[in-house]
Image (cartoon, grey):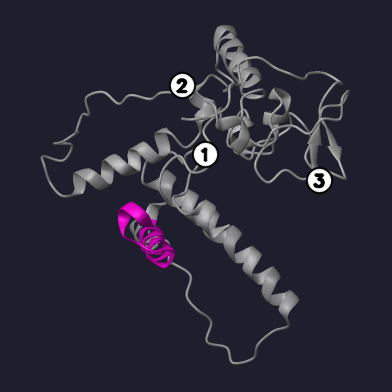
Amino acid sequence: MWWPPHDQLAYAGDRVPVWDTRAKGFADPDTRTPLPTFEQACEDLDEPAHVVRFGEQVHVKGILGGTEEAGRHVGYLTKYLTKSVGQAAGLTGTATDAQREHARRLHAELQVTPCSPRCPVWLLYGVQPQGARHSMTPGHCKGKAHKPEHLGIAGRRVLVSRKWSGKTLDDHRAERTAFVRQLLDHAGIRPPTASSETDIPPRPALLLHAVAERQRWKAEYTAAQHAAGESPPDDICSATTEEAA
């Protein structure tokens, strides 16, 4: 990764670069000299800032006896094992003091580590980020990589479900509906059916009816789970929650 050096802060505290209206860029707070752009800072680099070497790759097989379903199950497990990086890093309620301290130090380091060429953290190292604008605050980036729940991993950690399952949101909804109906039938609870009334109530009445119906469905679904000897999960992570939102 060919980035400018960012191991020693050039600015800190109240002494940070300021926006120069005339130059339409950030400048040194004392000399008013414009800071070099990201491209200019990369021109005379002798060595890369980061080098990543990939070792021997392991191809996991045989989860389901070598069937075609193995890859999909591996992808599904991987998605939810890595969906919340903060939990794995020790930010849960059961974390030890050492784990929480480790996560705190890692997050503090990420606060002064640029996440991309457009990151405002570059201003602390005397470099003007790409696309610099007056609304930027030196050292403060809104990117996901700087947040404690992401801990340096920006964007999606895994592909959305439809990328590896080949199913759309409608397919997932239909599967969930079929599963719930099957569970209710097994518990002897009659699933709700569509109304045959021709008169359409006012919109507020329809909304209140929908809320009450959803609450009733949830109560019946929970009762069916108890009847089947299953314990409802405390935290359900849907494969389509983020997409549906």
Dot 2: element: loop
Above or below for 172 versus 135: below
Identify the residue at horizontal 53%, vertical 82% (top origin).
195
Which residues, given as a range, are shown in magenta?
162-180
Quick one: label 2 or label 1, which is nearer the N terminus?
Answer: 2
Q: Main secondary structure of the magenta part?
A: helix
Residue 99 shows up from this direction: yes
Q: Which mark is residue 235?
A: 1
Above or below for 84 versus 97: below
Q: Amino acid at mark 3?
A: Lys
- Reading the image, the residue beneath label 3 is 24
Disc 3 to disc 2: CB gap under 8 Å? no
The foreground one among 207 and 48 is: 48
Front tag of 1 and 3:
3
Front tag of 2 and 1:
2
Q: Amino acid at mark 2?
A: Glu
- Reading the image, the residue beneath label 2 is 47
Residue 149 shows up from this direction: no
Residue 108 position, x and y percent, is: 66, 18
Identify the residue at horizontal 47%, vertical 49% (top origin).
238
